Amino acid sequence: MPTLHVATYNIHKGFSQFNRHMMVHELRERLRSLGPDIVFLQEVQGLHLGHAERHEDWPEVSQHDFLAEDVWQATAYGSNVVYDHGHHGNAILSRFPIRHSHNQDVTHLRFERRGVLHCVVQMPDSEQTVHCVCVHLSLFGRSRRKQMEALSVYVEELVGTDAPLIVAGDFNDWRNRADDLLAQRLGMTEVFGGIGGQGGAPGRSFPAKLPLFRLDRIYVRGFNVDRAEIHFGAPWSRISDHAALSAHLSRDGNG
């Protein structure tokens, strides 16, 4: 399998912090300059009729299709929150074919709809596939624990214990409970702790201007972590309230 460049980003529905400015065009250029092979996105606006009326340059297609155009040939979207004027959820963009996608409902509280988007991505010039899961977990600790349990059961049943796996997104997990509740159970490594096998805490990703909290993560199984980066400060902090994370991965020779 070739090396992989992956990124995760909570895009705040295409608006800057406090919703002051529509930033989806700047977001597209920034993602293209970063150039990952697979992108895990949270708070993606699939449809919003009000924004389309108020903003002349609002994309005519869904945000994930707009962001992917001419660069990422395959997309998958999972709508989690639906309202009268639209919906939003998680998305995965890939330079490589997506063979299968499924959005698994992991809602614990009815007023806080959550899902995990699972895709099977076909690697180029190879029969190997990679399971990619995009998550955006609850703001509440008990609900996050329930959701990580549901995610673990889902992966164990449908992905198995040996297949290459990437789980990335906004975990809202400032106490780092995911290492005990998810990573160890599934045999996964968080990328910042996995650089050179050094171990350590996940990177700080919120707020984007000067990150203090470790909310966003990339967990991997079956890969070595060659490099991991946090993309914060200008211009990233003008686009979203979260920093973006990226990692360069190479296939684990034992896999």
Image: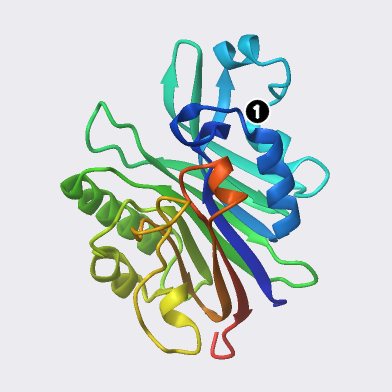
The residue under the point 68% across, 21% down is 58
The residue under the point 23% across, 64% down is 177
Locate residue 219 relative to residue 144 in the image: left or right. Answer: right
Residue 81 versus residue 170 in the image, above or below: above
Where's residue 194, x and y in %?
Answer: 45, 81
The residue under the point 73% across, 21% down is 57
- Residue identifier under label 1: 62
Q: Is residue 96 visible?
A: no
Circle 1 crowding by C-alpha within 10 Å: few under 14, some 14–19, many from 20: some
Residue sticking out furthest to the left: 142
Amino acid type, residue under disc 1 in the picture: Ser
**Relative depth, front residue between 115 and 128:** 115
Where's residue 134, x and y in %?
Answer: 48, 51
Where's residue 249, x and y in %?
Answer: 61, 76
The residue under the point 49% across, 83% down is 195
Locate residue 9 relative to residue 23 in the image: left or right. Answer: left
Q: Is residue 98 visible?
A: yes
Instruction: Tell me the quadrant of the picture where the N terminus can be found.
Output: bottom right
Where's residue 250, x and y in %?
Answer: 63, 80
Residue 23 lies in what quarter of the image?
Answer: top right
Locate residue 63 relative to residue 97 in the image: left or right. Answer: left
Residue 149 lies in what quarter of the image?
Answer: bottom left
**Relative depth, front residue between 210 and 28:** 210
Residue sticking out furthest to the right: 70
Give the image's coloring scheme. rainbow
Instruction: Tell me the quadrant of the picture where the C terminus can be found.
Output: bottom right
Residue 126 versus residue 16 in the image, above or below: below
Q: Secondary structure at mark 1?
A: loop
Residue 60 versus residue 206 in the image, above or below: above
